[in-house]
Image: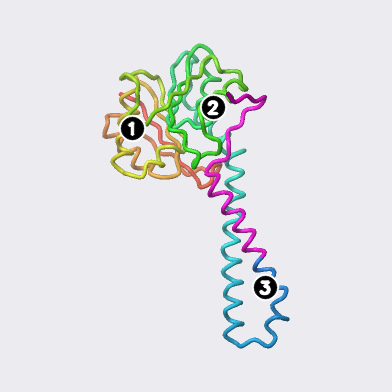
Amino acid sequence: MVTRSRADYGLDAPGFVKTCLRGGIALLALALVLIVVGNTLLAHASLLVVVIVNIIVILALINACWMIPTALLMFRSSFVGKFRLRDRLLDNLHLRGDEKVLDVGCGHGLLLIGAAKRLPHGRAVGIDLWSSADQSDNCPAATLANAEAEGVADRVEVIDGDMRHMPFEDAAFDAVVASLSIHNISNREERRRAIQEIVRVLKPQGQVALLDIAHTRQYAQDLAACGMRNVHVSGLSFQIYPPVRIVTATKG
């Protein structure tokens, strides 16, 4: 059992972020070394060697100049930006406080626990397959520890499960949310299946809010095809990097 005094919602895409940061620093160091010692080392080298070394320096600098900023932007996204966007998404649901809300691909519980705080007389349920590739230290115990630290453990539940085949009855939830989870399904038809499941478990007049970095237009199309109304895709938000859109809809 994980216990903690403060909630920890983890670093998103930890492998990619760490690779970018370490790789960028290494490439920058390589370029600087070649620049600093290049004049001495290449004083008697052939023109071909000089050209090759200069190309290496240029390529190293170009790659370092995108890798390091990308890593830093994603760090900021994980520890600042996603909290601001979470609050915006949940505020726009206008929850009364007695609803039942589902977080699809809940991870460490960013939306799940944020929703639970708005549900003093309701319940927030999260479902996930707990992939550590998408979020560091991703497991049910970590999510429940966050709920405990945030003071909402009594109204939070987490379930192991696949969003394409959710173990819930029809019309079980007043609202369904998801953050950076559906795009992890690589197959187009399987993503459509996940959207269909979201609509299935949603009550009439229930609300959907799906935040993602990709495929948001597809989500909107699939929601509309399932009979959802007021389907809307937001503009890009740069609070999270890569930038995201939020798809919202209401079940007719």
Is residue 90 found left or right of 72 in the rendered image?
left
Label 3 is placed on what type of residue?
Leu
Which residue is at the front of the view, 49 or 69? 49
Confirm whether the magenta stretch covers residue 94. no
- Label number found at residue 211: none
Pointer 1 residue: 164
Instruction: Residue 167: give x, y in percent of width and height.
Output: 34, 23
In the rendered image, which quarter contains the C terminus? top left
Q: Is residue 13 above or below residue 110?
A: below
Pointer 3 residue: 34
Give the extent of the magenta segment. Answer: 1-29
Is residue 82 found left or right of 210 in the rendered image?
right
Label 1 is placed on what type of residue?
Arg
The structure residue drawn at horizontal position 55% and vertical position 23%, both measured from the top left corner, is 144
The structure residue drawn at horizontal position 56% and vertical position 69%, both measured from the top left corner, is 59
Which residue is at the front of the view, 97 or 16? 16
Pointer 2 residue: 143
Label 2 is placed on what type of residue?
Thr
Instruction: Identify the mark nearer the N-term, 1 or 2.
Output: 2
The structure residue drawn at horizontal position 55% and vertical position 39%, both measured from the top left corner, is 136
Q: Outermost residue toward the front?
A: 1
Instruction: Residue 246: give x, y in percent of width and height.
Output: 44, 37
Instruction: Residue 241: give x, y in percent of width and height.
Output: 53, 46
Residues at discs 2 and 3 in contact (Cβ within 8 Å): no
Q: Residues within 10 Å of mark 2 (few under 14, many from 20)?
A: many
Q: Residues within 10 Å of mark 1 (few under 14, many from 20)?
A: some
Judged from the image, the secondary structure of the residue bearing numbered disc 3 is helix
Q: Residues within 10 Å of mark 3 (few under 14, many from 20)?
A: some
Q: CA distance from mark 1 to mark 2?
A: 21 Å
